[in-house]
């Protein structure tokens, strides 16, 4: 299992980070615009499915093109199908973390304050970024804490940009939700 994970760590990190960033971007922009939990959940899940499939299929196509190009190479190559699958699964599974508070809010009909849900989502997303970076550092034999910090900072920048874009655009367009 360790050999498998080591071979496919780039795809895991790629899918997990992108899934978390893009899903949290949807959450952050929607929260910045004041959209309800149910709509945030719908947008987040739609992002997970569509963007996750796009990422997985793109990873597969890119890997199969590279695999075809180097078919003469006697080195054992990673399977393009597994590359695509790992990217897709990491995107969907890890990328679902930012919408979990909204899912619970909708299913339990809690009607929690939107700021509370956003703060919980932000905390879970930060923990997720730290975890992805830590795993990347451990598997890649780099400093796990350094990689965790870098991943968290990059994710925070993306999330901040999305939140403020939603807030600014909602105000600029006069959207009242």
Image: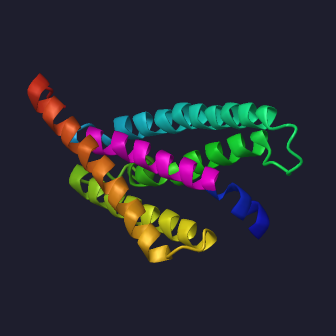
Task: Name above or below for residue 112 compared with residue 148.
Answer: above
Side (left or right) of 177 relative to 65: left
Task: Name above or below for residue 139 compared with residue 176.
Answer: below
What colour scheme has been applied to the protein in the rendered image? rainbow
Side (left or right) of 168 relative to 96: left
> Per the image, is 160 magenta?
no
- Would you say the magenta stretch is mainly helix, strand or loop? helix
Q: Residue at the location (69% across, 55% down)?
A: 8
| Residue 117 visible in the current orientation | yes
Kindly indicate the quadrant of the structure image that contains residue 82.
top right
> Per the image, is 11 magenta?
yes
| Residue 174 visible in the current orientation | no
Kindly indicate the quadrant of the structure image that contains residue 80.
top right
Q: Residue at the location (44% across, 76% down)?
A: 145
Residue 135: x percent and y percent?
56, 69
Q: Residue at the location (46% across, 62% down)?
A: 128
Residue 56: x percent and y percent?
63, 37
Residue 101: x percent and y percent?
39, 55
Kindly indicate the quadrant of the structure image that contains residue 71.
top right
Side (left or right) of 58 relative to 128: right
Magenta region, residue range = 10-31
Q: Residue at the location (51% across, 63% down)?
A: 132
Residue 138: x percent and y percent?
58, 74
Q: How many marks?
A: 0
Task: Name above or below for residue 160 compared with residue 131.
Answer: above
Quarter of the image with the N terminus in it? bottom right
Quarter of the image with the C terminus in it? top left
């Amino acid at each position: 299992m360790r050999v498998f994970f080591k071979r496919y760590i780039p795809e895991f990190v790629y899918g997990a980070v992108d899934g978390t960033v893009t899903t949290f971007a949807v959450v952050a922009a929607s929260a910045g615009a004041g959209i309800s939990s149910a709509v945030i959940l719908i947008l987040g899940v739609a992002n997970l499915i569509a963007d996750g499939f796009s990422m997985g299929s793109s990873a597969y196509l890119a890997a199969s093109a590279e695999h075809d190009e180097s078919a003469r190479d006697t080195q054992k190559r990673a399977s393009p199908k597994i590359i695509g699958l790992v990217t897709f699964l990491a995107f969907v599974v890890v990328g679902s973390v930012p919408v979990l508070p909204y899912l619970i809010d909708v299913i339990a009909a809690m009607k929690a304050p939107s700021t509370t849900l956003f703060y919980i989502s932000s905390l879970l997303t930060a923990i997720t970024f730290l975890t992805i970076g830590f795993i990347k550092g451990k598997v890649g034999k780099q400093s796990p804490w350094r990689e965790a910090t870098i991943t968290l900072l990059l994710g925070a920048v993306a999330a901040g940009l999305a939140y403020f874009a939603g807030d600014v655009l909602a105000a600029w367009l006069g959207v009242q939700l």
